[in-house]
């Protein structure tokens, strides 16, 4: 078994993968199956579904016909084997780790993660007995130095938020592979249009669908995708995958379901018991969003480069951190991993610092002051006092979210209007 | 399972085998319900296939209400497909018996790969599938596998009727 080969190009698959006309009505768009339960044909059919012997829907906490279209489409776009969608990006991280981790196990994570992820890993997960070691993954020697046999995975962001650090995924994947542990990549900020982590050796991908996949800032959601290539039986590190599961009468997930065993384990065990289900209505918005992913990302990147160039040449701007700029130290990695563009989220600092930044945020008229990225609308934010507020000053500085930093998420409006808006706001300093 | 990804079959080949098969002898079918072979047999029975369990240790008993045979030669019925749940090398021990009953297809499960047996089958004009599961392929091509968020690689612009469950 393996990932099916793709007969169609990415742009065709964003629209068609996973969906088909409704078998009963012929409805061409994916209907919203707003239902909690599904009828069983007989008591034997019901039992076979509960025992996972038949494919089918039982209860929408575990799966739903609208949600499954989104799942298959995301699996297909990432060139993965299977996917499980859930209520948010944070839920996706919890679900991705749940089959891997036992109390006392540790995660080796990049220091350059979204602030919310750092908090989730270091505080919420601690209560499960899961430890975390954060390392500066821009130098892979740091990973090798810290890695030990308590680590059950390496977790990184392909493109980090807010400071746009691009990591050398291929080299990090090799380290994980040698240690016989999976590399998990949060691919939210890049989206599968800009980076495909499985092509560089990653084993598991997570997304906050809330950002570029949805694209319109209207729905919360997350997804976990497996490559289908990780060999769970090569070590005894993953008993949840390779030993009999008590709550399924001794079923061994990696054996019975082979290369989609991890997804089945997440769905049948983790999603069932942790309950962070995605609503079918939100799934519908994500399916619609995906249909224009390629067009939006193209425009996001084009606009962002123009705005970044404008800011870089502005006399009141101290620095711009955008991997798309030739001067950026991540530019060579950008050329390797993100030839189509480096996304529209980046940061800049003003020569006059924090107070001047507040003026810009208050004076813009098109940019919205919100805690989100990946919207069609252009967004502006002061990370130190909002998204990265929970972090210590040192952590903030490291995460590229120091006091003077302003984050932009460039939308798909006309770039001239965005530049003019920033120009006017900068005039108030 | 994770190697040999280069064994690739076109969808229309697999589809025509699954469409033209009515009876399946399953060699190595286990009587314990949490084993993968039991899952496959139950699924195929539910899709209307006639399943003949072959398992010397369970001969004479019943699995999923079907009489168990000790070898394929004992089955006195027309067998369209022989589905093999055995180690790759063990296929050498049973391939001659299988060829004698002249099935249309010899199907080896995920992880079961035996090129020598496949060559023998082809000489005898028997279709061969290796390293795949008929349950997963049926589910993939019918659309049912997609219900579990699995990438089927199948695209449809017309509505398709998913074959009803018989039981």
Image (cartoon, helix red, strand yellow):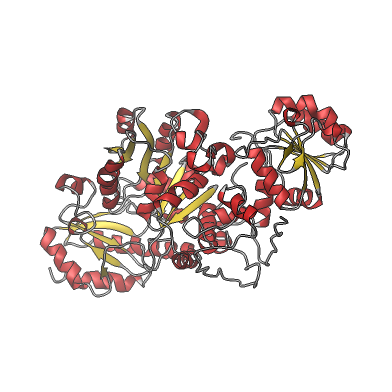
Q: Residue at x 38, y 40 (%)?
A: A168
Query: In front here: B2 or A94?
Result: A94
Counting from the top left corner in percent of width and height, residue A261 is at: 53, 42
Q: Is residue A280 above or below residue B47?
A: below
Position above or below: B81 against A215: above
Q: Quadrant of residue A155?
A: top left
Q: Position of residue A357 (x, y in %)?
A: 16, 63
Image coordinates of residue A83 in percent, x first then y, are: 50, 51
Screen quadrant of the C terminus of chain B: bottom right
* Front-most of residues B56 and A172: B56
Q: Quadrant of the N terminus of chain B?
A: top right
Q: Nearer the viewer, residue A62 or A297?
A: A62
Q: Position of residue A257 (x, y in %)?
A: 58, 42
Q: Is residue A150 visible?
A: yes
Q: Please give left or right for residue A189 compared with residue A34 in the image.
A: left
Residue A414 located left or right of residue A398: right
Can I make out residue B151 in this image?
no
């Amino acid at each position: 078994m393996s990932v099916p080969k793709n007969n169609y190009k990415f742009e065709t698959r964003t629209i068609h993968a996973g969906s088909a006309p409704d078998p009963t009505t012929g409805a061409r768009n994916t209907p919203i199956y707003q239902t909690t339960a599904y009828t069983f044909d007989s008591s034997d059919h019901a039992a076979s579904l509960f025992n996972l012997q038949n494919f089918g829907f039982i209860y929408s906490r575990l799966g739903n016909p609208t949600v499954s279209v989104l799942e298959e489409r995301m699996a297909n776009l990432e060139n993965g084997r299977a996917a499980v969608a859930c209520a948010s990006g944070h839920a996706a991280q919890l679900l991705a780790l749940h089959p891997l981790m036992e109390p006392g196990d540790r995660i080796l994570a990049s220091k350059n993660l979204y602030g919310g992820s750092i908090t989730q890993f270091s505080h919420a997960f601690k209560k499960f007995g899961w430890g975390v070691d954060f390392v500066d993954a821009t130098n892979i020697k740091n990973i090798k130095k810290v890695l030990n046999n308590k680590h059950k995975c390496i977790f990184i962001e392909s493109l980090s938020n807010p400071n746009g650090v691009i990591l050398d995924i291929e080299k990090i994947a090799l380290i994980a592979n040698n240690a016989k542990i999976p590399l998990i990549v949060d691919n939210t900020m890049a989206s599968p249009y800009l980076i495909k982590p499985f092509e560089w050796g990653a084993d598991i991908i997570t997304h906050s669908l809330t950002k570029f996949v949805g694209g319109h800032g209207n729905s919360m959601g997350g997804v976990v995708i497996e490559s289908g290539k990780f060999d769970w039986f090569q070590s005894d590190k993953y008993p949840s995958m390779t030993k009999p599961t008590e709550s399924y009468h001794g079923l061994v997930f990696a054996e019975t379901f082979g290369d989609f065993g991890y997804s089945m384990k997440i769905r049948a065990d983790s999603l069932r018991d942790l309950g962070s289900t995605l609503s079918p209505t939100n799934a519908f918005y994500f399916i619609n969003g995906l249909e224009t992913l390629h067009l939006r990302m193209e425009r996001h990147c084009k606009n962002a480069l123009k705005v970044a160039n404008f800011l870089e040449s502005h006399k009141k701007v101290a620095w711009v951190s955008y991997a798309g700029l030739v001067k950026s130290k991540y530019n060579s990695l950008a050329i390797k991993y993100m030839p189509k563009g480096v996304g529209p989220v980046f940061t800049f600092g003003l020569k006059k610092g924090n107070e001047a930044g507040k003026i810009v945020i208050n004076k813009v008229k098109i940019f919205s002051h919100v805690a989100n990225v990946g919207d069609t609308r252009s967004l502006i934010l002061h990370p130190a006092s909002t998204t990265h507020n929970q972090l210590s000053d040192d952590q903030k500085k490291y995460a590229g979210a120091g006091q003077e930093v302003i984050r932009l998420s460039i939308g798909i409006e006309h770039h001239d209007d965005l530049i003019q808006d920033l120009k006017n706001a900068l005039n108030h300093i | 399972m994770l190697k040999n990804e280069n064994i690739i079959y076109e969808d229309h080949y697999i589809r025509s085998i699954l469409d033209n098969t009515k009876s399946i002898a399953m060699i190595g079918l286990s009587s314990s319900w949490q084993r993968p072979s039991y899952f496959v047999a139950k699924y195929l029975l539910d899709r209307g296939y006639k399943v003949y369990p072959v398992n010397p240790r369970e001969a004479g008993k019943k699995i999923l209400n079907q009489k168990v045979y000790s070898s394929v030669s004992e089955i006195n019925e027309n067998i369209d497909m022989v589905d093999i749940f055995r180690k790759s090398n063990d296929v050498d021990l049973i391939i001659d018996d299988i060829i004698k009953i002249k099935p249309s297809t010899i199907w080896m499960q995920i992880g079961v790969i035996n090129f020598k047996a496949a060559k023998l089958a082809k000489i005898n004009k028997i279709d061969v599938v290796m390293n795949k599961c008929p349950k997963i392929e049926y589910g993939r091509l019918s659309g049912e596998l997609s219900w579990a968020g699995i990438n089927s690689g199948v695209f449809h612009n017309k509505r398709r009727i998913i074959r009803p469950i018989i039981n």
